[in-house]
Amino acid sequence: MKERKLRKNDILLIGILLVISGLLFFFAYIAKDPGGSVTISIDGLEIMELPLKDDIRIELSSEHGLEEGHRNLLHIKDGKAYIDEANCPDKVCIDRGEVCYEGETIVCLPHKLTVTVTEGEKQEIDGVSE
Amino acid sequence: MMKTKTGKVALHGMLITLALILSYVESLLPLSFAVPGVKLGLPNIVIVFALYRLGAGSAFTVSATRVVLVSILFGNMMSFGFSAAGMILSLAVMILMKKSGKFSVAGVSVSGGVAHNAGQIAAAVLLLGTKEIFYYLPVLCVSGVTAGICIGLLSAYLIERVEI
Ligand SMILES: [Zn+2]
């Protein structure tokens, strides 16, 4: 059994997959825009939209539609949003770090929570001089 | 060891235990890279090994039992849904790729790794009802390919060398 040898087909397959990943990367990352707000969804349901330009600290709990006992602390600062405290088991939402570009998402799977950067009201960044 | 029925059961038990240990080891490695679902796929070594040396049925038994046990031990119903979707798609793809006879263990394992991530993303889209998760697809695709190559070469080595 010569299973160990990489065959031409394997290399072709790996090459194609890498090219597809590269293209996906290109579209996902090169064409990104800073977003204007974040949309918070729980279990697929949009519950609120917060502007990224404000300094906000909000504790998401059962009050907002999370399950009883579930808690995520969302922080918005300097145009970036991040979760700095949560009582989910995997803490993936905290590890995700800051999001600020359109389409970027913080996901907390155990709590069925997503925080997505959306266009919102655009921040005027360039082209404006005093 | 494979001669008797008891030997067969014992062997499957051993493989399941090994897959569980590898799942645990993997959960200890800080490889999440701030992206949910990026994993090395260490348990896949055992699955690929079972697929080549014992057949598709055994590979299914080992991976299905692993998913159920991991969910009971470290997860919840949500994580069970994700793992199960990833595992079924990954195994189906690997069985088909192996049957085609056109690829070596590395190719089969790479496709399994990518399919595993694709299955998890599909489950996330269905369960969470959000399309934004597709944003992670490129990262998961690249990590699936690289991890799949390493796991594939390692599995290929074990398939040749390990006596059972
Ligand atoms: Zn979380």
Image (cartoon, rainbow, N blue to C red):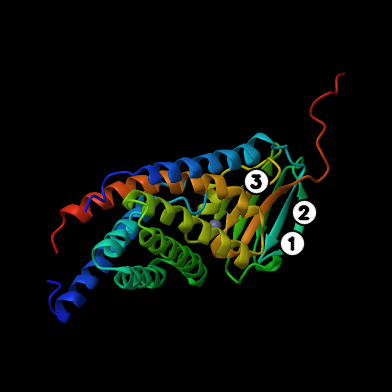
Q: SS for tag 2?
A: strand
Left or right of B77 on screen, residue B43 = left
Q: SS for tag 1?
A: strand
- Badge 2 amino acid: Glu
- Labels 3, 2: one chain: yes
Ligand 1 within 8 Å of the CB at mark 2: no
Residue highlighted by disc 1: A46
Q: Are marks 3 and 2 in contact (CB under 8 Å)?
A: no
Q: How crowded is mark 2: few (under 14 residues within 10 Å), some or many (20 or more)?
A: some
Q: How crowded is mark 1: few (under 14 residues within 10 Å), some or many (20 or more)?
A: few
Residue A113 in the image, given as x and y percentages of width and height = 63, 60
Q: How far apart are marks 3 and 2 (CA)?
A: 15 Å
Residue B41 in the image, given as x and y percentages of width and height = 38, 54
- Badge 3 amino acid: Glu
Quadrant in which ligand 1 is drawn? bottom right
Left or right of A102 on screen, residue B97 = left
- Image quadrant in which the N terminus of chain A is located: bottom left
Q: Is residue B48 above or below residue B59?
A: above
Q: Can residue B15 be seen in this view?
A: yes
Which badge, 3 or 2, is on the more N-terminal residue?
2
Q: Are marks 1 and 3 in contact (CB under 8 Å)?
A: no
